[in-house]
Image (cartoon, rainbow, N blue to C red):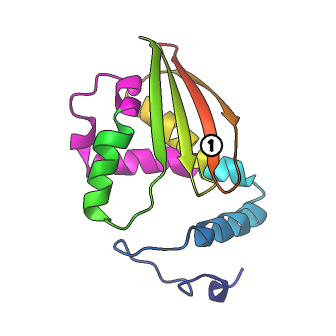
């Protein structure tokens, strides 16, 4: 992959807006280079990203007792804060339904195919709270909308 194939010619800053296809191109190139599947890399990045977000913005987790409480707050609290930093960001939507004290369903809806990133963020969240979780997911993509339903069960 050459940097010329990216929308920025390879230059990125923390305050910019970038075409999501740049990330896809870079991950595909990395996948070929290290011989690791794209989904595995994107999921690992999601786990890492959760840790970075919480270390930079610890207030996002204040008042959240566990993984499921945190996940229920993504669309409201977390995305509200992201919009303050990046007002033009096109964020995915998350809807949740608490099944029990130990189980939650979460639906990811986006114009971008990053449900594996969402899975990594979910797993990173569980790591942050020191909880073991079982996550199953089913994709139900529709036209130009990516839809994935996650079921998250706390095991600990």
Looking at the image, residue 30 sits to the left or right of residue 86; the answer is right
Q: Quadrant of the N terminus?
A: bottom right
Whether residue 52 is in magenta: the answer is yes
Looking at the image, residue 45 sits to the left or right of residue 59; the answer is right
Mark yes or no: residue 6 visible: yes
Q: Residue at x 32, y 55 (%)?
A: 82
Mark yes or no: residue 124 visible: no
In this rendered view, identify the residue nearer to me: 67 or 87: 87
Segment colored magenta: 43-72
Q: Main secondary structure of the magenta part?
A: helix
Badge 1 crowding class, 10 Å Cα cut-off, few under 14, some 14 to 19, many 20 or more, is many
In this rendered view, identify the residue nearer to me: 69 or 54: 69
Measured as percent of width and height from the top left, residue 86 is found at 32, 65
- Which residue is tagged 1? 147
Measured as percent of width and height from the top left, residue 144 is found at 67, 57
Residue 110 lies, with reference to residue 34, above or below; the image says above
Measured as percent of width and height from the top left, residue 119 is found at 57, 39
């Amino acid at each position: 992959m050459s940097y010329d194939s990216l929308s920025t010619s390879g230059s990125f800053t923390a305050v910019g807006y970038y075409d999501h296809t740049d990330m896809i191109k870079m991950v595909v190139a990395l996948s070929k280079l290290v011989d690791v599947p794209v989904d595995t890399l994107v999921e690992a990045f999601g786990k890492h990203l959760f840790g970075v977000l919480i270390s930079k913005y610890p207030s996002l987790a204040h008042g959240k007792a566990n993984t499921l409480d945190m996940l229920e707050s993504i669309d409201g609290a977390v995305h509200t804060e992201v919009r303050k930093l990046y007002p033009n960001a096109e964020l995915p939507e998350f809807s949740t339904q608490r099944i029990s004290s130990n189980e939650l369903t979460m639906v990811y809806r986006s114009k971008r195919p990053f449900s594996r990133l969402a899975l990594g963020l979910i797993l990173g969240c569980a790591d942050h709270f020191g909880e073991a979780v079982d996550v199953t997911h089913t994709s139900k993509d529709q036209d130009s909308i990516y839809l994935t339903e996650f079921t998250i069960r706390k095991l600990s």
